[in-house]
Image (cartoon, coloured by chain):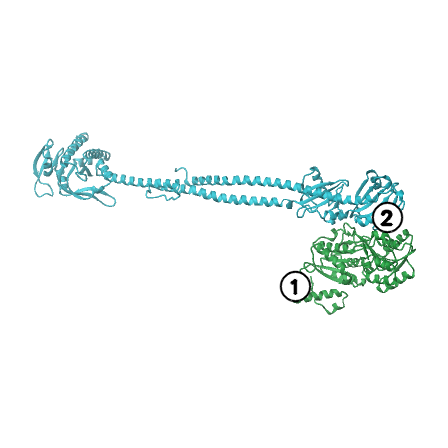
Chain colours: A cyan, B green
Amino acid sequence: MKAEPGPRRRTSLFWKYFSLLFAAVVVPLLIAGASEAWLGYRDARARLNELLNAEARLAAVKIEDFLDAIRAQLGWTVQLPWSEGGGDRRRLDALRLLRQVPAVLSLTLVDADGEERLFVSRIGLNRIDSGNDLSTDPAVEGAQADSVWYGPVRFLDGSEPFMTMAVAGNRSSVGVAVAEVNLKFIWDVVSEIQVGRTGNALVLDRPGRLVAHPDINLVLRADEAGQRPLQDLRAILLTRPGEAETGRDIAGNMVLAAMAPIPGVDWSVIVKQPLSEAFAPLYGALWRTAALLVGGAALAAVLAWWLAQRMTGPIRVLEEGVTRIGAGQFDHRIELATGDEFERLAKRFNEMAAELAVSQERSQRISRLRRFLAPQVAELVDRSGDDSVLDGRRVEVVVVFCDLRGFTSFAARADTATIIEVLRDYYDMLERVVNAHQATLVNFFGDGAMVLVNAPVSVPNPALRAIAMAGDMQTGVQALLAGWRTAEHELGFGIGLAMGPATVGRIGSQGRLDYTAVGNVVNLASRLCASAEDKQILLDRVAAGAIEAKTPLVELDPRNLKGFDQPVPVFAVRGNESP
Amino acid sequence: MRLARPPSAGAVDRPGRRGFVALAGGAAVSATLGPRLAGAQTLPVIGYLGSESPELYSSRLAAFREGLLDSGYSEGRNVAIEYRWADGQYSRLPALAKELAERPLPVMVAPGGAEVVLAAKAATSRIPIVFEMGGDPIKLGVVESLARPGGNLTGVSSLSVEVSRKRLEFMREVRPGAKRYAVAINPLSPTAESQLRNLEAAAHSLGVELLVLRANVEAEFDGLFAAVRDASAGGLVFSSDPYFAYRSRQLAALAARHEVAAIMQSRDFPLAGGLMSYGGDFHQSHRQSGRQAGRVLKGEKPADLPVQRVTKVELFINVKAAVALGLIFPPSILTSADRVIE
């Protein structure tokens, strides 16, 4: 207990409880939060994947539709063979096509021999039957081979995207229609496509140049170096087809993008959404989860703190109380009103402290009583719990005095250790005898002692008891004296006893308590003792009368005793009436 | 940025009549709504250089404002426009442009032809300029390239100038028999030479002769039509020129009076009773210039904004005028017409 400092143990117990309770709440919370976040991320990713891919496919279809519509219009112009004439009707058809398809800048009709028969334009002059040989034109050759031919994207004046589109009829005799298509018109399609709030779509041609973008300026800038990020993005998307991937757009912002191909022209549609926007709902959910986790943890901490406090608080109070009680503060009471085991424990401790206090008080009283009462008497007084027996009163007592003869001269010659040893043996012997006869040893003084019989505890026939005790004293002390007597030292032991009324009771100050008797009989007994010789036991008349010859006595001559006007009758126990 | 300048005595003599009215209005507003002036002063101000009067520009202005609105700007709400009008006296344009350039404008708009653009370009190399013109901005030295204009100018180019020859072609289709056609040229126009060359080449391909007539003031218009009639030319083809275009109404009336078949670049001409028009869609081009001005206001540099070409070239025909002239539109014209006015 002393080796281990209290506070450290308290702290560790508190922290043990606290950590355990805290963990019990927070760990499941964390697991739930983490799994929710992970599942949420997976769901969001899957949903975005789906959405962006659907948007990409839709955008691709729209752009394909745009091109198909032009192709279909061109198809109308290559249905009749050139041999049948009708040049004027064809011209009207061509003009009508220009009016109906704003994206077509010019249209060239080529006959089966590859000769230009008609050219109509919005800008340039129309030509009829110019006879230009276009049979080796890649557009004408391409259309004749595959029925539809898409040229590479060209940037007119380094800015406007154009593409040549050629369509051949189902017979070679109907020739080929070649159109210059202004791809700026795809803007109408692309600008309509919106993904989420700010997401959009863009179109890259085969080499990765921007063909269409909601911000037409980016297309018109035709800045291939600036479009590098888009080509990188396309490369990323190509590695995992059908998956939405993250990358950077022209401005360098992180985007989530998906791609769909446009067959025929071999372009790619990329739909993209800023990453922050795409994941905004997820981030929102994560933030909510995080906030809940933090809130839950804080609540758990408070709860755990409170519970741990509640658990260790009473223990601390108990420990403190026990320490104080252990230190002898038996009036200390442990105040606990927790209504649980702790309160019961505190109650036990309080009871224990009360009992300890009672027990301590009793033992103190006993030890006090033991000083002048025979132990049995003391126990008796103590057990009865009533020490009123010690109260002052006037009672018939037998007072016995005894002392050694010649001890003063012995003490003057002997060394201190011997004196102490002799006195100790002497006192021990006297005390033993007094206790054995249930008498009261009032006190020792030097080589003498004063003993009371019949007080404070009444005994039957006190005079007889006193005589018997005196006899035992003589026997015992004489045996001791026999050991101590040497040639030089003449030691003796005399006893005087008297019987009569005396005032007995506790007499004492705050620090000291004695039980004693006051009265003439005390004086008489003392004088008798002083006049007794070695081995002699002297009695007064009253005591002698009380014995009623049960012990053989010898009446000696009355003696003049100090303090007595007349000679006092003196009796001695026979056998040792004279030395 | 001073928006509301108190009218001075000199302001009355200024050519910018409308500008003065606007300024006076501004002063009135500042007098009555004193506390709001601070807010109004923080509005960005667009300098708008017009070659004609606000009345002639009204349809163009409306389109320009639409474009501004597309970019999120609305005049009076979050942007102010400071106008300068030359009232048809193009020689005043450089001075007006300089006047605008003296102010710390975030953007200057120079719509309505090469004259305006060149005046603005000469006035400042610092203030961003958004132009609207029919000619080729590279050939005129306005920008370095369409994709990367490079300097402080960007804008919109319609195809009006380039399609002058198409007007001759259409006129020939309407009056197929004629050997000779008249063309009207504004000699002061920066594109006059190139258009004339363009038209002469077209005439050569078409196998017709050209009667070149020049006019640069309204007073010469009457003589123009008289000359066409006197030369018994097949018709009159106006070269692309804003001076002509903005006077479509007047020219249409003269054409009707002189019974001359004529074709112009602006749809205003057939709408006012003229025979035909073929040219870029000015509504589209002015609207586009409004959008670009908005982007410049938002902080983009003209050098990074590609010059946009208006994709639409429109053919308007007026059947009533044709009937009055005893003409019948051939099917090819009817087919190609974007709008037939009856």
Q: Quadrant of the N terminus of chain A?
A: top left
Q: Residue at x 64, y 45 (%)?
A: A276
* Residue A28: % across, % down: 52, 39
* Residue A138: % across, % down: 84, 41
Q: Quadrant of residue B132?
A: bottom right
- The local crowd at label 1, few if under 14, some if 14 to 19, many if 20 or more residues have their Cα within 10 Å, is some
Q: Is residue A326 left or right of residue A141?
A: left
Q: Are marks 1 and 2 on the same chain?
A: no
Q: CA distance from mark 1 to mark 2?
A: 62 Å
- Judging depth in this view, the residue of A16 and B294 nearest the camera is B294
- Judging depth in this view, the residue of A327 and A230 nearest the camera is A230
- Give above or below for B41 relative to A146: below
Q: Is residue B222 left or right of residue B5?
A: right
Amino acid type at mark 1: Leu
- The local crowd at label 2, few if under 14, some if 14 to 19, many if 20 or more residues have their Cα within 10 Å, is many
Q: Quadrant of residue A514?
A: top left
* Residue B179: % across, % down: 92, 55
Q: Quadrant of residue A354?
A: top left
Amino acid type at mark 2: Arg
Find disc 1 in the rendering and name its residue. B37
Is residue B247 something one can see in this rendering?
A: no
Q: Is residue B221 left or right of residue A336?
A: right
- Judging depth in this view, the residue of B166 and A482 nearest the camera is B166
Chain of the residue where label 2 is placed in the rendered structure: A
- SS assignment at label 1: helix
Find disc 2 in the rendering and name its residue. A91
- Give above or below for A56 relative to B300: above
- SS assignment at label 2: helix
Chain of the residue where label 1 is placed in the rendered structure: B
- Judging depth in this view, the residue of B60 and A513 nearest the camera is B60
